[in-house]
Amino acid sequence: MPEVLKAPLAVEFPFTRSLGPVQSAFLTGLRERVVLGVTAADGRVLVPAVEYDPVTAEELRDLVEVAPTGTVTTWAWNHAPRRGQPLGTPFAWVLVQLDGADTALLHALDAPGPDSVHTGMRVRIRWAGDRTGAITDIACFEPYDGEPVQPGGHSGEFGNRLTGIVAPARLDYTYSPGRAQSDYLNALSERRTVGERCPSCRKVYVPPRGACPTCGVATVEQVEVGPRGTVTTFCIVNIKAKNLDIEVPYVYAHIALDGADLALHARIGGIPYDQVRMGLRVEPVWTEGARHPDHYRPTGEPDAAYETYKELL
């Protein structure tokens, strides 16, 4: 049986957004250890505070302080916390209806085990020591058996209010290619490039996906293409990526390998960035032990005529 390929992958980027007046007050309040809700048209107090009524869609502005104590409405035990989650030890995800609110807030509850958590239990906010104006200013909730805490009646007016936030977004997952892409990757490790031919339109697709994107039928006939090809279009990269040790500017291009009916994406090297052009003939450059080409470089052949690759733009 062929080896099942898999690899850990991560998609990560900083998400930057501006804040409206209500969410600005809500996050600034967390920085100041104040929890604010907003009153909806039907009189309910919504926490977290939102800019628009979820029922009527009208704009909301009437802020009201709620208590840092509340009641668990539902929960789920997290026995294996992941990177970036609120606590590094097992904890419960809880929905907490804070005293004075009519909706529940999702956060973590620091508890010794699932047997100590139940719907209806009383909890309070444990504030983070270093607060910046984010939901993480609530470090977590913790069990509480004292008297309800009365809110202070804060108006929602703050000095130095937040106007925007930057939140890191990250998705970690394990990718396992199917038969077609596994064949493609295994061939690359042998310094060969293979595609698959559609039995209907007869086009050869590289990288193969196991089905024709035009006809929607399965593809199984393997076709070796390249190794040389033609630059169909390209872009000059001027912003350095953190995970690539490549000096800017450099060029990424779509390359139509000889015999393929779909251009693939690769870096162009061995030529000044401002001399890369459409129609440039290129070939792969391999490094020792690599499973795929490091980049493509000019072959020295005359440029390909536009008519030979215009359908692949």
Image (cartoon, rainbow, N blue to C red):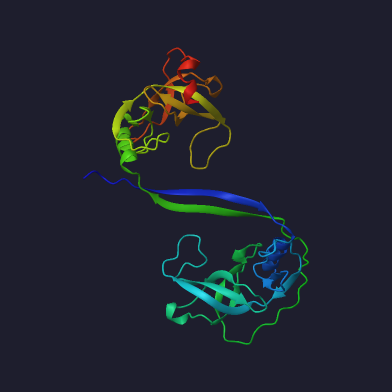
- Please tell me which residue lies in front, 100 or 113: 100
Tell me where residue 114 appears, x and y as whole percent: 43, 77
Q: Which residue is rendered at x = 48% and y = 23% of the image?
A: 311
Q: Quadrant of residue 287?
A: top left
Query: In the drawing, does residue 279 fall left or right of residue 186?
Result: right
Query: In the drawing, does residue 187 fall left or right of residue 46?
Result: left
Q: Kindly tell me whether residue 280 is visible in this rendering.
A: yes
Residue 287 higher or lower than 37, as above or below: above
Tell me where residue 268 appears, x and y as whole percent: 47, 26
Q: Quadrant of residue 191?
A: top left
- Please tell me which residue lies in front, 233 or 200: 200
Residue 195 higher or lower than 66, as above or below: above
Tell me where residue 157 appears, x and y as whole percent: 78, 67
Q: Residue furthest top?
A: 302
Query: In the drawing, does residue 218 fall left or right of residue 298?
Result: left
Q: Locate the N terminus and report the quarter of the image it occupies.
A: top left
Q: Which residue is rendered at x = 52% and y = 42% of the image?
A: 242
Q: Which residue is rendered at x = 71% and y = 72% of the image?
A: 42
